[in-house]
Each structure stands twice: as C-alpha cells, then as structure tokens.
Amino acid sequence: MQSLRLGIDTGGTYTDAVLIDGADQVEASAKVLTNHQDLVSSIRHVLDTLPQVRLRDTRLVSLSTTLGTNAVVEGRGTPACLLLAGYTETQVHRARLHDLVAGGQCVLLAGAHDAAGNEIEPLDLATAKEVIRRHRDQVTAFGISGMFSVRNPAHEIALRELVLSETDLPVTCGHELADALDAPRRAITVAFNATLVSYIDRLIRSVQQTLNEHNINAPLMVVKGDGSLIQAKLALERPIETILSGPAASVVGALHYTHCNNAIVADMGGTTTDIAIIANGRAVLSQDATQVGAWQPMVESVRVLSIGLGGDSEVGFSGGAGLAIGPRRVIPMSLLVDRHPQLMSALITQTKTTPSARSNRFAVPLFATQAQYDSLPAAEKQAWEILSEGPVDLSLKAMSDRPLTRSIAELVRRGLALYSGYTPSDAAHVLGLMNHWSTEAAQLATTIWQRQMRQVYGWGRRSSDDPCEIARVVHEKVISSIVQAIMRASLECAHPNSSKSELTALNQLVIEWIHRRQDHPSSSLLSLTYDETVSLISVGAPASSYYPQVATVLGLELKIPEHAAVTNAIGAIVGSVVQRERVAITQPIQGLFRVHDHTGTSDYTDFEAATEYAEKIVRRMAEMRARAAGAEQIEVQVSRNDNTVKSDDELRPIFFESHITATASGRPGQAQ
C-alpha cells in the first residue's frame, strides 16, 4: 500500500486535515470545529473522520496553525517576563512592550554593548536574579533582549543561563530569533515568542497525543511563517517562527494546485483575512514588512497583510464611521445556538424585549493554563467555574449580578473567555450562502442586532425589518473591507518604501476611483486595472461566499482551488525544510574586520580571511540547523552582500559591513 502524508491545520474556527499520496494528490480530507477548551478532542475528531485504514500508512505529519496569529490580532497571549539589558524606558514605551507581555513584566537591567560588540556597561546579574525569582511563579515564559546583542550576545547568554538555573520555564534570547539591528523591534519579537510558547506547546502536545492514539508513528513537522517546515521540538523553542504559519501554508497550498506566476492569495478564516502576493511563481518574503495586527515582529515570513476580518468578526457600530466589522472575534450566534440549542428560547425572548448593549451577548470559556487560573482573583475563578457549566446570558446577568459580568469582562480581556455576537457568518446564513449552523438563530440574531443598532446606537434607520435586507448590508460591508485590504496589500508590495500615511492616502484614492468606475462605468477618461497576468486566488471556507464579487470589483480573474476549504492543511504537508544563517562582518577600526556570530566575535586583519571564516561558519550552521529541523539530502547556497561607498579620493570603495548568508534546504525525512 502506498505511504501517505498527513497535513493538519488548527485555526480559530476550524481544524482541517488531509491525506496526501506520493503524487501530491488529496486522497481524503476532513473539517471540524475547533474546540479551544479541548484541542485534543478537535484533532481526534478530524482524524476520526478520515479513512482509518489509510491513516495507518502515514509516514509524515505536518501542522500549520493560526492560533498564534489570532492571539496577537485579538490582543491575547500568556504572561511573560522580559529582561531588557541596556534599554531605556522611552524605548519600552514607544515599542508598546508592556501591551505585549499580557499581564507580565518588562524589566530594565544595567548592561550594554556598543555597535562594535564592545562591552560598555557590565551586566547587573544580581538584580536579574532577584527579578527572576520574583516573577517566575506569575509568568509562563521569559524573554531576553540586549542592546546590540546581534553584535555580541554575551549578556543575553548569561541571562539565559541564570533563568535556566532558577526556573524550568521556557526562555528565548533575541540574538537567536533575529540577526538585524533595531533593538526595539527585536524586543517585540522576543515578547511575541515568550507569550506564544504555551499556545504552541499545548497544540503540539495535543497533536502528538492524538497521533499516538491512532498509532501513527511518524515525524511531526510545523509550518513556519515563510512556508517552510521545521521539526515540532524546534517550533517549541521558537514559536515566533510559527507566526503567520496558517497564512504561509495557505500560500504554499494555493500555489501547489494553481501554478500561478503572479497572483494575490486571500485566505479568509474565522478571525482574520490574510493576503499575500505571488511574484514570478514564488511568495514574496519579507522581514521588514511582516505585520500581524498592529505589530511588526522581526521574523522573515511570507509577506502577509493580516487584518481582523473573518467570518467570526463582530459586526457593530463605530461612531461616525457607522458600520464596523472586527477586529474582535466573537462566537457567531448561529454557531452558539447550534452548539447549545437550549439558548434558542433566550433569543426568541430578546426579539420581544427592549434591546440593550448586551443583546446577542453570551459568554463562554475559551482556554486557561493552570498558571493563569491559579493567578486569578477569587471572583474571576468563580466566574470561570460558572462559565464552565454553560453559556451565560449577559443581558440578564447585567441586571441581576453586575459583579459577575465585570469578572467575565476581565476574563475576556485576559483572553480566557469569549463573547458571542452578530457576525458575517450569521449574515451569510440568512442569505443562504452558508448552512453549517443554525439558520433560525442567525435570522433571530439579525433582527435583534438591527433593533440594537437603531434603538441603542441610532444607526441604520430603515423602513424594512426584513433580515435578508439587513444581512445584505453586512455582506456588502465585508466585500468592501476585503477589497480595501487587497488594494492595501497590493500598494504596500508595489511601494515598499512609502510611508504609512502616503499609502493610506493612495489606498483611499484608489478605492474611490474603483467605486466611481462601478457607479459610472462609461464616464471615466482613465482606467485603473491590475496587470492582466495577475489572478486572485481565494482559499478558506468562506471563499465562495465573498470572493466572486470581490474579483468583479477589482477586475481580476478568480481562481478557487479544488480543495480551497482545506488549502492550509495541504500547504502544511507539501512544503520543504529551509533554514538560513547569517553573520555580519564589520570594521570597528580601520584595517580590523570583525565577524559577529551566535557565539561572539572574531577579529581579522585581512578581509578575505574574515570572509572565508564567515562563509565556513554560516555554511556549517545552516546545514546543522536544516538537519536539526528534519531535512534530508540538504543543499546549501551561500551569498554575500557588501555595504560599501565609493569615494573619489579613495582607490577602493570604503567598507562599512558585509552580510554572509547561507540557505540550506531539503525534503523532510519520513518514517520507514
């Protein structure tokens, strides 16, 4: 019997799985709802849906996920402690690091190096030890970042050893995650990594447990943000690399079946819409432009614009802007009632009572680590226990038990619980574009939402109470938002050096032009169109609900792959292992060339000797990393980029620095 590969994608709403044969064809696929309280049950369920006889022939498993991306976009994450050597409070404030550590701490420590890697202030290890002991029971991980640590990582290494001696919590150093300057962005990257460790750890353990239950003894890989694969144990050490894992997998999967040279890939899920650009048959990669929500971590990934717009995004009122969708994710009312049919009577009652700000608002538990639960105040622990018994109707509790609603609100703020609300998925059910969950609940929720908008917020005064008409307004708003996001991603890729304000103004102008062309197609002297070689590839469960109209508005050819609903899971298993290693060569004083690598610095008086050493180091390190990541039959390519300036007074260019990069790639090894 032919061996198979198993791809799994765990998203905020669905968990998908596919079995791929040796010819990269889908033999079977499955899709189930993600249970955030019990990821094991979701993964078990999706595997149980696949042909069990064929599952036993699995020789490789690979996982992609949007859980990390969703946690960032929604402002969730687990508490972390950042140890920042040589930083100032101003830098911490401007980088908004306090917002990222999710209830943890950012601690400034004395100790710094200069741009040449020389120590200019000794590290305060005594204070660091006190800080570690004080916070180790309140956080789930430690992150370490030092100024100019990419020039000399000695302080970060010393702090890491101290953390490991005082606690068994995960710890990450900035020089291990990023090799470029810009210390605040590197600190943001470290903060991301630290707050996401528990999410990825929980997911990988859940997958491994389920594979064991199904007697699948095969290597487990995880998709990185650049679309390549890495062994699961390494993903646990560097979860930041799985940021945009889901979107990257969707790009790999989309390319695998459409073979487009130039395209826009749009992946719409429950929480986000992720947009990537394909140029010359390859996904555009970026470190500087990687953006997740409002953040720009320093990690190379598929250049993705990820916005909080999905099927589960909350539809609400935004002052002068009127109707707003997202970025907050809520449970669609159609899904909530499908899971808890006893709530139908509560919805019927709300259609007959005066609406309030809490109409359509129930609360359910999401997920909490033991450490998070233990750190909760007594009132919030009690609220968690109440939520664990079933959804809480906040429109009732707001009048009878205000302390409980406040405690639930705090749980939601911490990312431990989730509200329900009116969503694009509900509108799609009303319009007959979806039928996964309760259409009756969606219709009732639509009526309740419209009355809420009218009577509470004074928006949307209409003579008709037809749910279809109301749902159509929401549907058109979703399409308009997707169009704007695609145009923004296109412009940012075409003009990478433009400022945000310039791109915003240009985007608005283009959108107005598009709408004017739609309203008056024959009156414009100028046309605005995409290059005829560009296609729009739409993937994800809602692809057919929105993207035919989006493609029409943008004038693009639409391609929806055959297995669009499980494209992420396909992309998770058809990729390769790719690892890069880069070192810098600087000239701190005339005639002295310094090589900066992960172990420290090495000085040479001859540039060619420094280059030879640097190339040897990066080649060896890249190959070692690729092998550790699970690659076989590894190929290594080395490139060099010199930063020099020509001078009329000099016979040779003035040397500033050089970067030597090695890229090692290979196919992941499979079980025999």
Image (tube, rainbow, N blue to C red):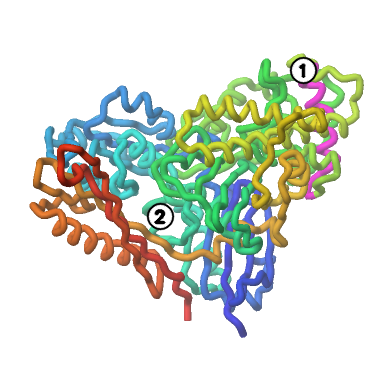
Residue 418 is at least partly visible in this image: no
Q: Position of residue 599 (x, y in %)?
A: 19, 53
Q: Which mark is residue 236?
A: 2
In the image, is 458 to the left or to the right of 503? right
Badge 2 local density, few (<14 within 10 Å), some, or many (20+)?
A: many
The earlier-in-sequence mark between 1 and 2 is 2
The prevailing secondary structure element of the residues shown in magenta is: helix
In the image, is 220 to the left or to the right of 531? left
Q: Quadrant of residue 155?
A: top left
Q: Residue at position x 69%, y 36% from top?
A: 528
Please say whether residue 444 is one of the residues in the magenta stretch.
yes
Q: Position of residue 247 (x, y in %)?
A: 56, 50
Choose between 507 and 98: the one closer to the eye: 507
Q: Magenta residues, as a range?
A: 436-454
Q: Position of residue 373 (x, y in %)?
A: 47, 39
Residue assigned mark 1: 459
Q: CA distance from mark 1 to mark 2?
A: 47 Å
Q: Residue at position x 38%, y 31% from top?
A: 97
- Pointer 1 with pointer 2, Cβ within 8 A: no
In the image, is 8 to the left or to the right of 117? right
Q: Secondary structure at mark 2?
A: helix
Choose between 580 and 657: the one closer to the eye: 657
- Disc 1 marks a residue whose amino acid type is Trp
Quadrant containing the N terminus in the rendered view: bottom right
Q: Quadrant of residue 660?
A: bottom left
Q: Residue at position x 85%, y 26% from top?
A: 351
- Disc 2 marks a residue whose amino acid type is Leu
Q: Residue at position x 55%, y 48% from top?
A: 66
**Marks 1, 2: nearer the viewer:** 1
